[in-house]
Image (spheres, grey):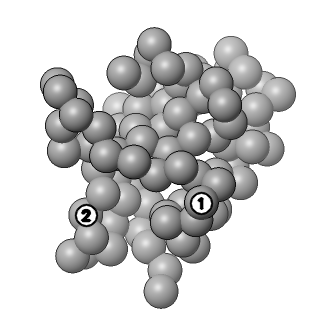
Amino acid sequence: MSWSLVFTEQYEKRAHRFLKRHPELEKQYLKTLQLLEANPFHPSLRLHALSGRLSGLHSVSINLSYRITLEFLINDQEIILVNVGDHETVY
């Protein structure tokens, strides 16, 4: 069961800025995307629902410091990427 990652234009700009600031994280970032596409429920991603003003979104971990927020559409098996960055940036 494979999931589709949806890269919006806004997300691509954010990801480009993120990787420009943190080139050392590119390998971890790409591995996170691959794992997310293959199995978003993998324990290492630490997928969890957000609350408050980000209610309706989910988050996965790139590492202990950096996250990707996303919209998780289970019926369509689509994952719409929303933001990437450290805890303060994405929350």
Q: Nearer the viewer, residue 69 or 55?
A: 55
Which label number is shown at residue 69? none
Identity of the residue drawn at 50% across and 45% down: 60
Q: Residue at x 54, y 61 (%)?
A: 36
Q: Residue at point 58% right, 52% down?
A: 45
Q: Is residue 30 above or below residue 50?
A: below
Query: Label 1, label 2: how many angstroms apart (C-alpha)?
Result: 19 Å
User: Is residue 1 visible to the viewer in this orientation of the structure?
Assistant: yes
Can residue 8 be seen by looking at this rendering? no
Circle 1/circle 2 CB separation < 8 Å: no
The residue labelled by disc 1 is 43
Please, is residue 34 above or below residue 80 in the view?
Answer: below
Residue 4 higher or lower than 47, as above or below: below
Q: How many marks?
A: 2
Position of the C terminus, as image quadrant, is top left
Q: Residues within 10 Å of mark 1 (few under 14, many from 20)?
A: few
- Between residues 61 and 26, which one lies in front from this camera angle? 61
Nearer-N-terminus badge (1/2): 1
Mark identifier at residue 73: 2
Q: Is residue 1 left or right of residue 45?
A: left
